Image: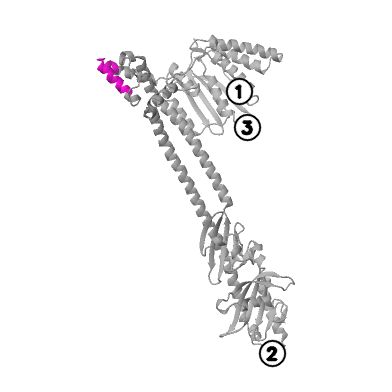
Amino acid sequence: MKIRREVKKYIRDYKFNSLFVKNLILLLALIIVPLSGAVILAYYSYNNMQKNEIEAYNKAIVEDTISGLERVLKEARTQLIYIGFNSNVELYMYDTEEIRELNYKVKSISELIRLPVISKDYIDNIYIHSLKSDKVITLNGISDYKTFKDKAVFEAFTSQPAEDKKGVLLTTSRSTGFDRMLMSVFQDVKYGPLIAGTVVMNLNLEELVHEINLSQEANVYISDGNKIILSNVLEQIGKPVDELEVSDKIRRNSTVINGQNCITARTLEGAELEVISQFDLHTYQNKLSTIRSFILTFLFVMIVITGILATLISIRIFSPIDTILSSIREYRSALIGEEDMLKGKNELTYILNTIHRTVSKKRDVEEELSERVRLLKKAQSVALQSQINPHFLNNTLDTINWMAIGLLGGKNQISEMTTALSKMLRMSLGNTDIIIPMRTEIEHCRCYLEIQSKRYEGKFEVLWNIPDELYECKTIRIILQPIIENAIYHGIKHLSNRGEILVNGKIVNDIVELYVEDNGLGMKGEEVEQLNRNMQCDIIKESAHIGITNVNQRLKLYFGEEFGILIDSREGIGTKVKIRFPVIKS
């Protein structure tokens, strides 16, 4: 608190020239700038990677559709050519009197076209039209073209301009008594340069969707350039391509990501058909939005944490300078007289000016430097245990205890917690020795646990396994309570199930070893390694709270560097803290 007050004073006096502010800004810049850059780069890299994956996936859907469609059309044309060059069909096309009179020849042609119809589920029927006889052969026999129910199928083909004739069309069949759309594949039957007739294979659209195996993860459309002749969205079949919601975004033989859609279009060579795949990016956008929110939250949290850490580090760095300034202020009359203390651009300038003034007053330079060294060493020391005067609090707690008993008509949880806390304070007040028996330390810890058990009723259980020989061993005060407190607050508090803390001990080669184990959250390996490394450090680090590091430092200060604390923890399993100090019984 003192350092914070001094820091505020120096910031007020020196503004941005203060060493504290400069250190803080430098630390923040060194951490936040690379962190922000890395986070932004990761976000845009992920975004581009997702776009590339979506484009590749949509292209794969189109390629698969084209592959299936090419296979079906190739099989259809092969079958139609085969039918066209059949000898019976050839005789039928020439319309000889003999063939017209021999019904079994017509029957053989019907059988010829029946085979592909029954072998392929997606083939609805096949018609053969002879221009010379103006008759049509179907599965059911021969009919006059003028009275043929599906004459519109042939008319859709013959009505096209000769120079722009398409061999694959969306047609309407009325053979079943109602209109239904089919994809029709036409093949002119030529003998030499002359066209003798036309063979058409009508494909069932629903079966064709399954045969081509159109993807259900995107809207796939097959267009003849004007209207949609096949799609996995059946209600779109027959509609003009211009009526699609994404029609203005379609570019031939390209992939476009625009708004909420990824559109890929590719022309089918030799068939004058175009395959269009519309992939909805809604799921991708939601995922990207989630990632963006996570990144922003992560960045904000990291900036806050970085700001706190940078402030603490800056205060830590500034602490020796503050000690020097405090000493200068204490001896300013002897050093620089009663003049203004704040002459200089920053704290360092002020310190240098002070030294210069001291030298100018013919003070011993060697003594001055020795004093600076002493002050710097003094700045490295830390306060490890704060003391409070418990008299007033103890009396007050006794008053609260009797008031709780009086108001609630007897002992209750409030009076029990108050009694436990009062007992802890009395023990602190009554034991002024530096070291105490383990029995007293354990009793002090049990009072603490009595309070916590009321607060976290049923949340945890503490098991004691301390041999009798340990109870009379001497130790420094308050070594178990901070360890158990850490186990409760950092290990067990956030568990959904009941926690367990085991406290046991033994004597090994005249060394007391105490163990505090919990089944809490545990810590990551690198965190445990760093904590153990810090506790093995020779430098005593300042801490604002009594905790594991505080206990470790006090053990080392009193008993020696070879004693102290060792931590073993597994994330998701629990933590085990080992406390070592020598056996002292007298």
Q: Is residue 204 left or right of residue 23?
A: right
Q: Quadrant of residue 518?
A: top right
Q: Quadrant of residue 205?
A: bottom right
Q: Is residue 42 left or right of residue 404?
A: left
Residue at (46%, 32%) from the top-left corner? 307
Main SS of the magenta part reads: helix
Amino acid tagged 2 = Glu
In this view, 194 is above or below 239 = below
Element type at marker 3?
A: loop
List the residue tagged with mark 1: 462
Amino acid tagged 1 = Val
Element type at marker 1?
A: strand
**Where does residue 181 sit, x and y in percent of width and height?**
67, 69
List the residue tagged with mark 3: 496
**Where does residue 186 sit, x and y in percent of width and height?**
61, 76
Q: Earlier in the sequence, mark 2 or mark 1?
A: 2
- Looking at the rendered structure, which numbered label has been put on residue 537? none
The answer to whether the residue labelled 2 contacts the one labelled 1, judged by CB atoms less than 8 Å apart, is no
Amino acid tagged 3 = Ser
Span of residues in magenta: 350-368
Can residue 509 be seen from the camera position used here? no
Q: Residue 436: within the magenta?
A: no
In this view, 31 is above or below 508 = below
List the residue tagged with mark 2: 98
The front one of 561 and 526 is 526
**Where does residue 21 sit, x and y in percent of width and height?**
40, 29
